[in-house]
Amino acid sequence: MKACPTCFRLYPSDAAFCAQDGAALLGHGEVPSQKDPSDRLLGTQILARYEIRRIVADGGMGRVYEARDMELDKRVAIKVLHPEVARDQIALERFKREYEISKDLPHDHIVEVLDFQQTEAGQYVMVMEFLDGEELRALLKRDGRVSPAKMVRILSHVAIGLDEAHRREFVHRDLKPDNLFLCDSEAGPIVKLLDFGSARMNKNRQMSKLTSLGTTIGSPFYMSPEQAQGQENLDHRADVFALAAIAYESLIGEVPFSGGNGPAILLAILTKNPPPISSRNPALGIPAALDDVIDDALAKNPETRTATIGAFADGFGRAFGLTGDHVQWAALSVAELEAQIVAAKAASAPQAVADPFAADPFASPGPKAPPFVPPPPPPAAPVAARVAMDDAFAAANMEAAGVPQRPMTLIIVGALAALAVLAGILFVAFSK
């Protein structure tokens, strides 16, 4: 293996430069481990197999190191419990449980736990695959929000891993941005779920006893109502609720339920509904179709809640106009998902209709219309027609004066004939 002389990271033997700071890599034997006078583990070997190289992160449970597996000549992550935590039997049991559960979990999107032992000095350590990247929490702290396309990819990966864990009857129970690790790749984040130490195995009630021995397990901002109440019938739909709360926060930068302290947050979860996500920040252009998707996944009653993580991920993507499902989206890059979302939005936009009265006052005048020429007058009625009409009117006048008249039938027939001729002439004249 090789190592960076600046940041002490380990790399495969075929690497040349550090991806973090660009320094030329050296053989790991030429680069000493990170130095920290307060940490006596750095630079040592534990369990006659692992060489501790540098500090990766500090958490409430313990410290995480990057180490070299000397047997396999590869890097691993080693989590060491803080001494005060190791004295807590509940915390220690949770630590052991993560290793035991990991053996039965799918690992495409769940971190693989490789070993769990107690060192010669009495420390409890867990060995895991090493992941390059950052937790979702770190991304939110830095950027504030996650783009819809990236969130579709994240949810799709979580659905693949967690639905399979649920099928094997494991419930995570502590989903939060801190436990979604985003591994680096050119296509976008590859998600790995962390910390199954709080998991509940529904097929083995004995695995659920930790909650009653200690405090409520879970992070209050993402805790389902049934979990907040400590209900015994908690199942995989508690994870659906937690992931919906994470998605809500990731899109707009604010959690759906808030409060000044833990009890206030839990009270809000039990008694309130969050504002529709599309209304929280209209400038973000979040589609109203997502409101129902989020509301269904945050339903107070698990019986009416979205049934699976996969169903939630599918609804989330389709609200942004995507076709297909989370399995297909998981294989697409963020750029490809973004292009599909943009195309779907453009296709659904209402088409502009031209306003016939919206003439441009600054446009140059067009060609003048030709002057109006009235149609020619209709030709004069033929003499025969005029004679017939004159006879009809004369007969009417003579009758009024008491003069004997021609038979009325002849007069009527003559008048009708004259009118028919005149109507034909007018039709021809005006139809030209």
Image: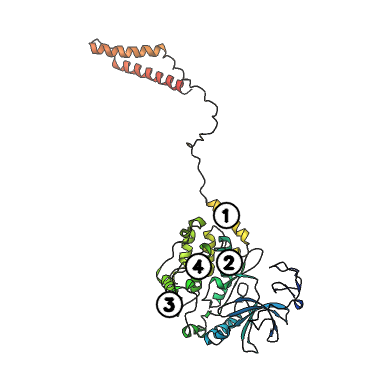
Residue at numbered disc 2: 139
Q: Position of residue 194 (x, y in %)?
A: 58, 75
Between the C-alphas of marks 2 and 3, the distance is 31 Å
Q: Position of residue 87 (x, y in %)?
A: 55, 88
Q: Which secondary structure, mark 1?
A: helix
Point out the tag, 1 or 4, that comes first from the N-terminus. Answer: 4
Circle 3 sits on which residue? 229
Query: Label 4, on which residue?
Result: 244
Q: Is residue 337 visible?
A: yes
What is the C-alpha distance between the residues marked 3 and 1? Answer: 42 Å
Of the numbered discs 2 and 4, the one sitting upstream in the chain is 2
Q: Residues within 10 Å of mark 2 (few under 14, many from 20)?
A: some
Q: Decide if residue 325 is in sight here.
A: no
Residue occupied by mark 1: 342
Residue 301 lies in quadrant = bottom left
Check if mark 2's residue and mark 3's residue have beta carbons within 8 Å.
no
Q: Amino acid at mark 4?
A: Ala
Closer to us: mark 2 or mark 3?
Answer: 2
**Of tags 2 and 4, which is closer to the observer?**
2
Q: Is residue 384 above or below residue 203?
A: above
C-alpha separation, residue under disc 2 versus residue under disc 4:
18 Å
Residue at 43% x, 19% y is 425
Kind of residue at disc 2: Leu
| Labelled pair 1, 2 in contact (Cβ < 8 Å) | no
